[in-house]
Each structure stands twice: as structure tokens, then as C-alpha cells.
Image (cartoon, rainbow, N blue to C red):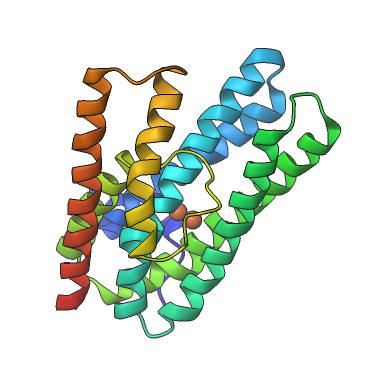
Amino acid sequence: MTETIKEQTLGQLGGKGSVLARQRRDHAELDRLMDHYALAGGDERERVLKEIVQLVFSHAFAEETVLWPVVRRGVADGTELTFRVEEEHQEINDLIAEVERLSPGDPVREEKIERAFSLIRQDIRDEEDLLLPRLQEAMNAARLRRLGALWEAARLTAPTHPHPVIPRRPPGNAVLGVPLSGYDRSRDLLGGPIGQGVRKLLRWAAGLLLAAFTAARRLRERS
Ligand SMILES: [Fe+2]
Ligand SMILES: [Fe+2]
């Protein structure tokens, strides 16, 4: 049985471009941001929360779109393992959707943020200790790096907020995620109407996300 990816060297993970190393970097950044949120106050606290939400949703969407289908296909108990993290993602999605409807300072909002943070930490442990080591057993370093590039492409163009209409699995999540990603990113960048330049950027982003989804499907068809 392969050990947790938390303690392994970059070389063991397949290099810095491997999906395992990319996952661990994002997880460490989420941990750092959640710790920072606990200590921050006022506007800084809200800014950190916004960063956490954007990172959590793009990270999880890219997992569900390109990574978990490969795990289900290539790992013996991949279906159960991905089902467990999909449930965690769904619960985080629902909690953050409620947080976004409540006002800062509301104690109910703070409780939901705490619950979401503890689920994010649980999700990280399940992935680093159980799911990703199984993927590591099933793939060589070159494939882990190829999957890393596809996951990154999907992550960079994924939705950055919770959306109850997006299913957890492909192809529905990719089809619905593309237009919602455009909506989210314009909201994050501008907080206002979408200009011509941004429209172009969003078309490019949607193309990249669909390309990553298609390439991941090919990768898992070959496995
Ligand atoms: Fe992850
Ligand atoms: Fe996750």
C-alpha cells in the first residue's frame, strides 16, 4: 500500500508538474488560507474567505471533471473512493452557497464557514491519504504529469463559486460549468458588466476547459 502523498518527496510524486504535486500545493495553500482566516479581522477576513472560495471551487470542479473519471476507470475501488469525496464536495458546495447568502458578522454564517473548513480539511486528508496514493500506484510518472497538465487547464477555467445546478459528474458538470465559469470569473474580476475583451477571454477559457475534458476522456479510454 502506497503511503500518504503528504510526506513524499517531489521526485516520488513524479516531479512538480505531476497531478499529485499540484494537488498537494493547492491543499497546502488552502490550509494556509484557512489558518490566516482564523487570525484575520474585518476586510482582510472577507478577502481571505473570497480567495478560499475561489480556490476550493476551481480545484474541486477540475477534480470532478478530469481527475475522478480517470480514478474510477483506473483504480480498483475508484468508484467508492470518488463517491466519498464527491459527497464532501457537495456538502461544501451547499454550505458555501448558504454563506454567500448571509451577511458578514452573522453568527450562523460563521458556524457554516467553520463547518465548511472542517470538511475541506477532511477532503484534503481523504485525497492525500487514500485516493491519490491509489492513483499513484496505478500510473507512472509521465502519465501523472500529463494528467497534472489537464487538471491544471481545467482548474484555470473552472467555476469559482458554488452552483446547485452543476452535477458532480461529467459530462453534465463540464457542459454546465463552462458558461457558469464565465459568469463567475467576470464577477470576480469586474464586479460589473462584461466588456468585449473579457468576452474573448471567456471564450478562450471555455475552449480550454472543454479541451481538457476531452483530453482526459481520451486518457482514461486508453487506460
Ligand atoms: Fe484536492
Ligand atoms: Fe477535493
- Residue furthest to the bottom: 76
Quarter location, residue 187: top left
Residue ID at (78%, 35%): 110
Quarter location, residue 137: bottom left
Task: Please state which of residues 218 and 179 is positioned toward the viewer in this rendering.
Answer: 179
Whether residue 63 is visible: yes
* Label total for image: 0
Q: Is residue 162 left or right of residue 179?
A: right
Residue ID at (23%, 19%): 196
x and y, in percent, of residue 40 in the image: 68, 20
Q: Is residue 192 left or right of residue 48?
A: left
Q: Is residue 47 above or below residue 61?
A: above
- Residue furthest to the right: 107
Residue ID at (65%, 28%): 37
Task: Please state which of residues 199 and 57 is positioned toward the viewer in this rendering.
Answer: 199
Q: Is residue 112 above or below residue 47?
A: below
x and y, in percent, of residue 126 in the image: 54, 64
Q: Is residue 209 left or right of residue 36?
A: left
Specify the quadrant that holds the C terminus: bottom left
x and y, in percent, of residue 50 in the image: 55, 28
Residue ID at (61%, 35%): 34
